[in-house]
């Protein structure tokens, strides 16, 4: 269900781009369904014709924002580049995120940064402490303003029109069904909500901080304080979240407020300070440039009417924003995207009409609402989630099983696998561990370690001959690891098991660190080592590059677990 306060206004401007509006409605429905919906459900919930939904999905697939699995449409990691554009433009995660992380470490409690979004509160940074009794929110999740500590801080700036919209939303959605990130509440709770919320707003104004005493769910408590810009306006709220099993609502402020206030002060200093040096990950938010015109033409030629150019152009417009590009005039957006001024103008006006951009008539600025376009479900992806579609494509191309593994001590541990159907195949389940030294993925992973750590691991290894081919000499192993590092792959021939040959390549994260390896295993009788290299290595590298590209986008602001 769509958040009632975020529904589309009834009268779009004459310049509005209809296909762009339709594509955004499909993305919203996909996001509200957790990132996966059947095509039939999308037709029903958007009210669009089946042919229109098919064209929207075809265009979104070409953009890399959606993929299809059977009858389902699934959000793809590259869609996160739209939310990344907003997060980079507002600079809050980049400037304030490290301070929030430090506070979480010092208090050993979850800490978050949230911004106002209409009559709701949306998270832009999370430093969570995973515990058995906790409610974990994701970057991009939207909460009702009245259900949490930050909302009382932001509502202090509401005018009468804002309060009327809030009351209308409460009347239309008393159980908060339009906010899937929070547990539903009983409708009878709404009778006293207005008076109670206004009292909490007044209390927060007096105290300078706000308390959440189990407003979201029983047991969850939080304290929040506003972070203000140089003009004294609250731009975000810093919250510390705990559980009553650790701290009661009465005890929480005394336990955390001193450090919370110190961190708020440091954050306000950080907001006022000029940025030093190059912007972090300035290239992380894509500014497509004129080359997109060529890509558009090629896509249209290949897909014909199934590729809707006006939709693609409109979505690409959002990627013009980023670090150092928080507010842009029409001319700058057109130059950054390679679009004609008239085309960029129509897209910008459409996005502003839908609430994804704010404008003063000259400059356009992305709003937190951009995060509703799938950021929350996609920010929960793990590395195996990202890898599996690429492994499936790899298996389809080479007709052999493909796997992903990570280092676990001196072993490798399988975290993703797509088998192929053969009379003779290796049966490996997720979680399976093998010694690293006689496996192709293990050698790639060991080769990716810093030289000192690699040498230390080799020094403590006691390799055993698992087959007559297993290399156990430490000096020879060291040479093979250096060879794998230099070549960017490792081929292991019957060292783990007789008749098994495997080839592996590394997967790097945003920093260039090797975080995983991908391999293809095949029977030694099928191909010679040289034939295996020729047949498998290009496909392996393509799969790894695809995983890295998705990891680059997904890992910009979200933490991606390796399993």
Image: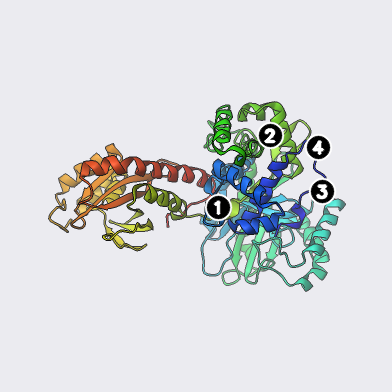
Q: Which of marks 4 and 1 is nearer the N terminus?
A: 4
- Spatial separation of the CA atoms under disc 4 and disc 2: 24 Å
Q: Within 10 Å of the Cα at label 1, are there few (<14), some (14-19), or many (20+) other Cα atoms?
A: many
Task: Name above or below for residue 328 compared with residue 78.
Answer: above
Q: Distance between the residues labelled 1 and 2?
A: 26 Å
Kindly report which numbered mark, 4 or 1, lies closer to the viewer in this rendering.
4
**Closer to the camera in the image, 95 or 6:** 6
Q: Earlier in the sequence, mark 3 or mark 1?
A: 3
Q: In this view, does 414 lie to the left or right of 279?
A: left
In contact (CB < 8 Å): disc 1 and disc 2: no
Quadrant in the picture for the C terminus:
bottom left
Give the x, y percent position of residue 376: 59, 54
What whole-number distance in Å separates the C-alpha atoms at marks 3 and 1?
30 Å
Q: Residue at x 28, y 44 (%)?
A: 447
Pointer 1 residue: 378
Q: Residue 14 carries which label?
A: 4
Q: Can you tell which of label 2 and label 3 is closer to the viewer? A: 3
* Cα–Cα span, label 4 and label 3: 12 Å
Extreme residue toward the right, this view: 160
- Label 4: state its secondary structure: loop
Q: Position of residue 186 (x, y in %)?
A: 73, 72
Choose the circle earlier in sequence order: 4 or 2: 4
Element class at badge 3: loop
Horizontal side of residue 88 vs 197, given as left or right: left
Q: What element carries label 2?
A: loop
């Amino acid at each position: 269900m769509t958040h009632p306060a975020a529904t589309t206004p009834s009268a779009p401007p004459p310049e509005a781009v209809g296909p762009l509006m339709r594509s955004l409605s499909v993305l919203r429905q996909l996001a509200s369904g957790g990132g996966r919906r059947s095509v039939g459900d999308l037709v029903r919930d958007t009210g669009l014709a089946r042919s229109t939904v098919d064209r929207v999905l075809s265009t979104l697939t070409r953009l890399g924002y959606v993929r299809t699995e059977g009858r389902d449409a699934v959000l793809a990691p590259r869609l996160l580049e739209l939310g990344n554009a907003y997060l980079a433009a507002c600079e809050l995660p980049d400037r304030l995120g490290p301070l929030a992380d430090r506070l979480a470490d010092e208090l050993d409690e979850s800490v978050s940064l949230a911004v106002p979004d209409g009559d709701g509160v949306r998270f832009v940074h999370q430093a969570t402490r995973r515990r058995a009794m906790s409610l974990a929110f994701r970057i991009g999740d939207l909460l009702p303003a009245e259900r949490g500590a930050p909302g009382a801080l932001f509502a202090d700036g509401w005018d009468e029109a804002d309060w009327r919209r809030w009351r209308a939303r409460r009347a239309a959605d008393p159980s908060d069904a339009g906010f899937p990130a929070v547990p539903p509440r009983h409708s009878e709770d709404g009778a006293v909500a207005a008076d109670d919320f206004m009292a909490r707003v007044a209390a927060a104004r007096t105290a300078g901080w706000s308390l959440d005493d189990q407003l979201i769910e029983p047991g969850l408590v939080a304290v929040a304080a506003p972070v203000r810009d140089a003009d004294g306006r609250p731009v975000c709220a810093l919250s510390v979240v705990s559980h009553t099993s650790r701290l009661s609502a009465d005890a929480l402020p005394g336990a955390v407020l001193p450090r919370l206030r110190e961190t708020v002060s440091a954050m306000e200093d950080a907001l006022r300070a000029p940025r030093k040096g190059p912007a972090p990950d300035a290239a992380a938010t894509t500014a497509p440039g004129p080359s997109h015109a060529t890509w558009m033409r090629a896509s249209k030629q290949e897909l014909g009417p199934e590729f809707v150019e006006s939709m693609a152009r409109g979505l690409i417009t959002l990627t013009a924003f980023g670090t150092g590009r928080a507010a842009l005039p029409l001319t700058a957006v057109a130059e950054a995207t390679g679009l004609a001024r008239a085309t960029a103008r129509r897209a910008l006006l459409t996005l502003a009409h839908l609430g994804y951009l704010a404008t003063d008539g000259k400059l356009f600025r992305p709003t937190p609402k951009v995060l509703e376009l799938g950021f929350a479900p996609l920010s929960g992806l793990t590395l195996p989630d990202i890898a599996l579609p690429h492994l499936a494509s790899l298996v389809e191309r080479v007709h052999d099983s493909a796997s992903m593994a990570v280092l676990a001590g001196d072993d490798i541990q399988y975290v993703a696998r797509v088998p192929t159907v053969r009379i003779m195949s290796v049966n490996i389940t997720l979680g399976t561990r093998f010694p690293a030294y006689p496996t192709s993925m293990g050698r790639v992973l060991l080769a990716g370690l810093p030289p000192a750590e690699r040498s230390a691991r080799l020094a403590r290894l006691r390799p055993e001959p698992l087959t007559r081919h297993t290399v156990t000499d430490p000096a020879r192993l060291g040479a093979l690891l250096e060879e794998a590092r230099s070549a960017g792959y490792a081929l292991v021939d019957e060292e783990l098991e007789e008749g098994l040959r495997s080839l592996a390549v590394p997967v790097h994260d945003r920093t260039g660190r090797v975080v995983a390896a991908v391999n293809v295993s095949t029977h030694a009788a099928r191909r010679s080592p040289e034939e295996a290299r020729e047949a498998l290595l290009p496909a392996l590298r393509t799969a790894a590059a695809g995983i890295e590209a998705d990891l680059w986008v997904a890992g910009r602001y979200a933490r991606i677990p390796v399993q």
